[in-house]
Amino acid sequence: MPVYQEPDLSGFARIEDLPTFNPDELRKDIMMSLPTYEQPDLSGFAKIEDLPTFNPDELRQDILMSLPEQKMQDLSGFVTQADINKAISGINMPTYEQPDLSAYDTRLAELEQSLAALQQPTGGRFSINQPQVRGLF
């Protein structure tokens, strides 16, 4: 019968030989590897209280003062409404007279009556209300 032989485990580590994890040591190692913060020199920058405030009225005034002064154009050579009224006062302008269109109204009524008479079925072969029967061919 075979005999059991224990394997040689001398090259393996034992549990008590393994290092334990310590989060405090890890945190300490990380903090030591980080560079230290150095505050930059901000003395050359302006503070909020040093900035000028914006005043839109002053800006508007500055813009208006920088615009050149506009001169009124000389319109004395142009015709005025009084000149036009004086010029046309001597012209005999015809007045509009509305034409008599009653003859057209009468004629239109006659045409409408004759058209209405055409739409009445006559009973003949060409009656509007009697469509022709058509075959398939």
Image: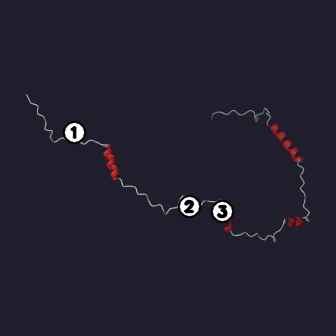
Q: Nearer the viewer, mark 1 or mark 3?
A: 1
Q: Amino acid at mark 1?
A: Glu
Quadrant where the C terminus is found in the figure: top right
Q: In this picture, is 100 found above or below 4?
A: below
Q: Which residue is mark 1?
A: 16
- Distance (Cα) linking label 1 and label 3: 82 Å
Tell me the SS state at disc 3: helix
User: In the displayed structure, would residue 107 be above or below residue 65?
Assistant: above
Q: Amino acid at mark 2?
A: Asp
Estimate the spatial distance between the alpha carbons at disc 3 and disc 2, rounded to whole Å.
Answer: 19 Å
Disc 3, disc 2: CB below 8 Å?
no
Residue at screen point 30% across, 43% down: 22
Circle 1 SS class: helix
For the point 88% across and 48% down, the residue is: 101
Question: Mark 2 and mark 1 in contact (Cβ < 8 Å)?
Answer: no
Q: Residues within 10 Å of mark 3 (few under 14, many from 20)?
A: few
Tag 3: residue type?
Glu
